[in-house]
């Protein structure tokens, strides 16, 4: 994308590199997440207005058009928890030099409609189909921004789906209490002889625990598919980020196998993340060294 000033020369101050565009999208995601977490729906419109200048500045930094900024502002005002996904899609569609990025936006809009209309998932496959629209497009967009091979998409999709399932299991009690949304597949609950009211308890029953453990095993299959993902990425910084995400996801999935998300912590602290990073980094460095030698 080349932007020219009035004199026909390229305008200063615009860095179109993948890290810059990625940073802008990350900031938009952070804004979205903070609004979704901190403010009830009735207050989001006012909060979005307060953040209007920062949002427009971010859009201007990547030469996003004014209409895109206005659309993102509208989403900030009205979309609940997963609003950041939509903003990433809008940003990707406009910042990307490839119009195929619009597919990510369409997929994210599909996820938005499902968030509004669907509060239960009958089967695990139904849940994975939702993840295909709500999670995978964000990872695909990041890969496109970095110019990575689209052959990596299946591994990206598996990792994004695994992360989303893990997040749903972590917050299964909270999602039931606060928004009456159940991501645990209904057929799994029925097979164990429990209803959604089991999520209202202070601690999970043995039957509900068996359902959660069963879902972590299916999530492990997704994580096995995504395991070679980082090795296939050209960009070193992105490869490190994906490798760490895979490591954190593996660890969280093990936590969910052994802990009760209704009564025990199943999230990483900053210290946990640092410890896992330091433990994993030597193996990652060796992988990158081996990869460079084999080129």
Image (cartoon, helix red, strand yellow):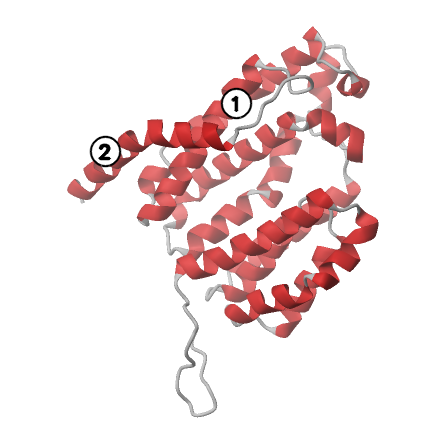
> Quadrant location of residue 56?
bottom right
Question: Looking at the image, is mark 2 or mark 1 earlier in the sequence?
Answer: 1
- Residue at the spot 66% in from the left edge and 32% down from the top edge: 126
Seen as rendered, the residue at the extreme right is 42
Q: Is residue 131 above or below residue 49?
A: above
Classify 10 Å Cα crowding around label 2: few (below 14), some (14-19), many (20 and above): few
* Residue 108 appears in the rendering: no
Q: Nearer the viewer, residue 180 or 134?
A: 180
Q: Are marks 2 and 1 in contact (CB under 8 Å)?
A: no
Residue 4: x and y, percent?
44, 83
Q: Quadrant of the C terminus?
A: top left
Numbered circle sitting on residue 253: 1
Seen as rendered, the residue at the extreme bottom is 7
Lateral position of residue 89 relative to residue 254, left or right: right
Q: Nearer the viewer, residue 118 or 90?
A: 90
> Quadrant location of residue 170?
top right
* Residue 158 appears in the rendering: yes
- Residue at the spot 44% in from the left edge and 44% down from the top edge: 153
Seen as rendered, the residue at the extreme left is 293
- Residue at the spot 58% in from the left edge and 34% down from the top edge: 164
Lateral position of residue 42 relative to residue 65, left or right: right
Lateral position of residue 208 relative to residue 276, left or right: right
Q: Quadrant of the N terminus?
A: bottom left
* Separation of marks 2 and 1 at Cα, in angstroms: 25 Å
Residue 276: x and y, percent?
40, 28
Numbered circle sitting on residue 78: none
Residue 2: x and y, percent?
42, 77
Numbered circle sitting on residue 286: 2
> Quadrant location of residue 16?
bottom left
Seen as rendered, the residue at the extreme top is 206
Q: Considering the numbered disc 1 on the image, is that residue within a helix, a strand or a loop?
A: helix
């Amino acid at each position: 994308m080349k932007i020219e000033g009035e004199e026909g020369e390229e305008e200063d101050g615009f860095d179109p590199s993948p890290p810059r565009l990625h940073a802008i999208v990350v900031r938009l995601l952070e804004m979205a997440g903070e609004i979704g977490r901190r403010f009830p729906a009735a207050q989001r419109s006012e909060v979005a207005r307060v953040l209007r200048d920062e949002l427009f500045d971010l859009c201007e930094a990547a030469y996003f058009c004014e209409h895109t900024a206005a659309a993102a502002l509208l989403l900030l005002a009205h979309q609940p928890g997963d609003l950041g996904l939509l903003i990433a899609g809008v940003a990707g569609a406009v910042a990307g030099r490839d119009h195929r990025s619009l597919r990510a936006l369409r997929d994210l809009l599909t996820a938005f409609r499902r968030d509004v209309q669907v509060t239960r998932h009958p089967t695990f496959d139904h849940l994975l189909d939702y993840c295909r629209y709500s999670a995978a497009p964000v990872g695909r967009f990041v890969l496109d921004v970095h110019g990575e091979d689209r052959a990596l998409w299946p591994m990206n999709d598996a990792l994004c789906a695994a992360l989303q399932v893990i997040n749903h299991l972590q917050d299964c009690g909270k999602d039931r209490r606060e928004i009456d949304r159940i991501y645990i597949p209904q057929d799994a609950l029925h097979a164990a002889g429990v209803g959604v009211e089991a999520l209202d308890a202070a601690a999970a029953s043995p039957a509900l625990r068996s359902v959660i453990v069963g879902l972590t095993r299916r999530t492990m299959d997704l994580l096995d598919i995504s395991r070679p993902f980082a090795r296939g990425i050209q960009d070193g910084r992105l490869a490190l980020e994906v490798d760490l995400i895979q490591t954190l996801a593996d660890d969280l999935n093990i936590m969910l196998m052994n802990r009760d998300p209704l009564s025990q912590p199943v999230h990483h602290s900053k210290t946990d993340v640092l410890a896992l990073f330091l433990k994993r980094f030597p193996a990652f460095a060796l992988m990158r060294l081996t990869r460079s030698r084999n080129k």
